[in-house]
Image: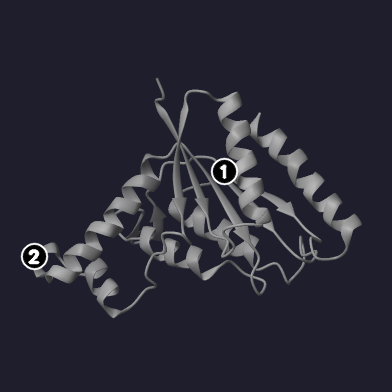
Amino acid sequence: MSNKRLLHIDSSARLTGSDSRRLSSQFVRQWIDNHPEYQVIERDLVSKPLPHLDETMLAAMMSPTEQHTPEMARIAERINMLIDEFLSADAVVLGVPMYNLGIPSTLKAYIDHIVMAGRTFTYTEKGAVGLVTDKPVFIITARGGVHSGMVTDQQVPYLKTLFNFLGIQQVNFIHSEGLNMGDELRSKGIAEAQAEIGRYAA
């Protein structure tokens, strides 16, 4: 009987032929092989996209329930469902391609749903405090070039800071890089990512 949950989030615009999707799926398979007590919760941010932040969504997040219009109530229901799903996960794996040095806008839309005052963080006299119980988060990137440790990598600083902000310290990155730099570098990048997947999923 499964009593733990692995939340698997994919954000690649490509539904087929995506390296980040292939690698994150490989992670899930190996994780389940090694941790059979887990069940997998799938969230595909492309086949089931979320709306981007707008005025009505902000109003739904920042106003009391009794002031909600029917539309705001529907938005709040969606937000709370996604937050509940995220909070109930014991581990999270994300497939994240690099688009223009950062994360896909689909993933940013998801983040804008789950980062909510009073639910995943709160403000105190000393500043913001994360409310999410620490859990392992595995972020599998797919990159056409080589960016690790360079100023062009805008994924790691943002995502690490964001999850830390929510209270999650176990943020792990698995990079597949050089995927558009010729067959040799592509094979090396995939192989290195697969080795890391094997290590983390064990």
Q: Position of residue 35 (x, y in %)?
A: 55, 25
The label nearer to you, 2 versus 1, is: 2
Q: Residue at x 74, y 54 (%)?
A: 176
Q: Residue at x 72, y 53 (%)?
A: 175
**Residue sitting at the far front:** 16
Q: Amino acid at mark 2?
A: Glu
Residue 118 in view in this figure? no
Residue 149 in view in this figure? yes
Q: Residue at x 23, y 74 (%)?
A: 59
In this figure, what is the number of numbered marks? 2
Q: Which residue is mark 1?
A: 170
Q: Mark 2 or mark 1: which comes first in sequence?
A: 2
Q: Quadrant of residue 145?
A: bottom right
**Residue sitting at the far top:** 1
Q: Amino acid at mark 1?
A: Gln
Q: Position of residue 183 (x, y in %)?
A: 88, 58
Q: Which residue is mark 2?
A: 66
- Looking at this view, is 40 or 135 the one in front? 40
Q: Quadrant of residue 15?
A: bottom right
Task: Give the secondary structure at mark 2.
Answer: helix
Q: Quadrant of residue 42?
A: top left
